[in-house]
Image (spheres, rainbow, N blue to C red):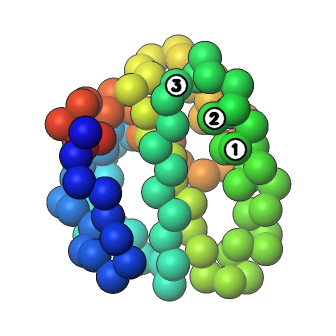
Protein backbone atom coordinates (compact mmCIF):
# COMPACT_ATOMS: atom_id res chain seq x y z
CA UNK A 1 0.00 0.00 0.00
CA UNK A 2 1.28 3.43 -0.89
CA UNK A 3 1.86 6.35 1.40
CA UNK A 4 -1.24 8.17 2.58
CA UNK A 5 -1.61 11.86 1.92
CA UNK A 6 -1.56 14.05 4.98
CA UNK A 7 -2.94 17.51 5.59
CA UNK A 8 -1.14 19.99 3.37
CA UNK A 9 0.49 17.32 1.16
CA UNK A 10 0.56 17.96 -2.58
CA UNK A 11 -1.72 15.65 -4.56
CA UNK A 12 0.49 13.44 -6.77
CA UNK A 13 0.49 13.71 -10.57
CA UNK A 14 -2.05 11.23 -11.91
CA UNK A 15 -3.73 10.76 -15.29
CA UNK A 16 -7.17 9.16 -15.27
CA UNK A 17 -9.15 7.74 -18.18
CA UNK A 18 -12.66 9.09 -17.96
CA UNK A 19 -15.95 7.30 -18.55
CA UNK A 20 -17.19 8.32 -21.98
CA UNK A 21 -13.70 9.12 -23.23
CA UNK A 22 -10.95 11.59 -22.60
CA UNK A 23 -8.47 11.92 -19.80
CA UNK A 24 -7.99 14.21 -16.85
CA UNK A 25 -4.64 15.11 -15.33
CA UNK A 26 -4.65 15.47 -11.58
CA UNK A 27 -4.09 17.77 -9.84
CA UNK A 28 -3.56 20.08 -12.84
CA UNK A 29 -7.20 19.88 -13.97
CA UNK A 30 -8.68 20.34 -10.51
CA UNK A 31 -9.81 23.94 -10.65
CA UNK A 32 -12.33 24.27 -7.85
CA UNK A 33 -11.60 25.99 -4.55
CA UNK A 34 -11.82 22.56 -2.92
CA UNK A 35 -11.63 19.18 -4.63
CA UNK A 36 -12.75 15.76 -3.44
CA UNK A 37 -11.30 12.76 -5.26
CA UNK A 38 -13.06 9.54 -4.28
CA UNK A 39 -11.38 6.25 -5.09
CA UNK A 40 -13.90 3.44 -4.72
CA UNK A 41 -13.54 -0.35 -4.89
CA UNK A 42 -15.89 -0.95 -7.78
CA UNK A 43 -19.45 -1.06 -9.01
CA UNK A 44 -20.03 -4.31 -7.12
CA UNK A 45 -19.38 -2.85 -3.64
CA UNK A 46 -22.66 -1.46 -2.24
CA UNK A 47 -21.05 0.72 0.43
CA UNK A 48 -19.02 2.56 -2.19
CA UNK A 49 -22.07 3.03 -4.39
CA UNK A 50 -24.01 4.48 -1.47
CA UNK A 51 -21.18 6.87 -0.66
CA UNK A 52 -21.03 8.08 -4.27
CA UNK A 53 -24.80 8.64 -4.33
CA UNK A 54 -24.58 10.49 -0.98
CA UNK A 55 -21.95 12.86 -2.41
CA UNK A 56 -24.12 13.28 -5.49
CA UNK A 57 -27.14 14.17 -3.34
CA UNK A 58 -25.08 16.94 -1.73
CA UNK A 59 -23.86 18.41 -5.03
CA UNK A 60 -25.78 21.70 -4.65
CA UNK A 61 -24.51 22.31 -1.13
CA UNK A 62 -20.97 21.31 -2.08
CA UNK A 63 -21.03 23.62 -5.12
CA UNK A 64 -22.04 26.54 -2.88
CA UNK A 65 -18.91 25.86 -0.83
CA UNK A 66 -16.72 25.67 -3.95
CA UNK A 67 -16.29 21.90 -3.80
CA UNK A 68 -15.98 19.76 -6.93
CA UNK A 69 -16.20 15.96 -6.73
CA UNK A 70 -14.48 13.40 -8.95
CA UNK A 71 -14.47 9.62 -8.46
CA UNK A 72 -12.48 6.74 -9.93
CA UNK A 73 -12.05 2.99 -9.62
CA UNK A 74 -10.64 -0.10 -11.31
CA UNK A 75 -13.97 -0.58 -13.11
CA UNK A 76 -14.00 -0.29 -16.89
CA UNK A 77 -16.55 -0.28 -19.69
CA UNK A 78 -20.14 -1.15 -18.79
CA UNK A 79 -19.36 -1.40 -15.08
CA UNK A 80 -17.97 2.14 -14.87
CA UNK A 81 -20.75 3.46 -17.12
CA UNK A 82 -23.31 1.94 -14.75
CA UNK A 83 -21.88 3.97 -11.87
CA UNK A 84 -21.53 7.14 -13.97
CA UNK A 85 -25.26 7.01 -14.74
CA UNK A 86 -26.04 7.25 -11.01
CA UNK A 87 -24.09 10.45 -10.34
CA UNK A 88 -23.59 13.86 -11.91
CA UNK A 89 -19.85 14.19 -11.31
CA UNK A 90 -17.06 12.79 -13.48
CA UNK A 91 -15.97 9.16 -13.09
CA UNK A 92 -12.51 7.84 -13.92
CA UNK A 93 -12.04 4.22 -14.89
CA UNK A 94 -9.31 1.62 -15.11
CA UNK A 95 -7.29 2.85 -12.12
CA UNK A 96 -4.19 0.68 -11.75
CA UNK A 97 -2.66 -0.49 -8.47
CA UNK A 98 0.31 1.85 -9.06
CA UNK A 99 -2.05 4.80 -9.54
CA UNK A 100 -4.02 3.91 -6.41
CA UNK A 101 -0.83 3.60 -4.38
| Front-most of residues 11 and 29 | 11
Residue 11: image tag: none
Instruction: Determine the secondary structure under disc 3.
Output: loop
Residue 48: image tag: 2
| Front-most of residues 73 and 25 | 73
Q: Please name the residue shown 31% across and 57% down the image.
A: 4
Mark 1 → mark 3, Cα distance in angstroms:
12 Å
Is 45 above or below relative to 55? above
Q: Please name the residue shown 79% across and 69% down the image.
A: 60
Count neighbours of disc 3 (C-alpha within 10 A) and say few if under 14, some if 14 to 19, many if 20 or more.
some
> Quadrant where the C terminus lies?
top left
Q: Which residue is mark 1?
A: 51
Q: Please name the residue shown 51% across and 37% down the image.
A: 40
Q: Give percent across and percent down for residue 100.
A: 29, 41
Instruction: Determine the secondary structure under disc 1.
Output: helix
Is 22 above or below relative to 14? above
> Quadrant where the N terminus lies?
top left
Do the residues bearing badges 1 and 3 touch, measured as CB atoms within 8 Å?
A: no
Q: Is residue 85 visible?
A: no
Query: Left or right: where does residue 44 sit relative to residue 30?
Result: right
Do the residues bearing badges 2 and 1 touch, measured as CB atoms within 8 Å?
A: yes
Q: Which residue is mark 3?
A: 42
Do the residues bearing badges 2 and 3 touch, measured as CB atoms within 8 Å?
A: yes
Instruction: Tell me which numbered mark, 2 or 3, is placed earlier along the sequence.
Output: 3
Amino acid sequence: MGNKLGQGDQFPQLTLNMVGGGIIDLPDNLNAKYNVVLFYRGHWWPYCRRQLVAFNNLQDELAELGVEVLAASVDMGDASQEVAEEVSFKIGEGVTRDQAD
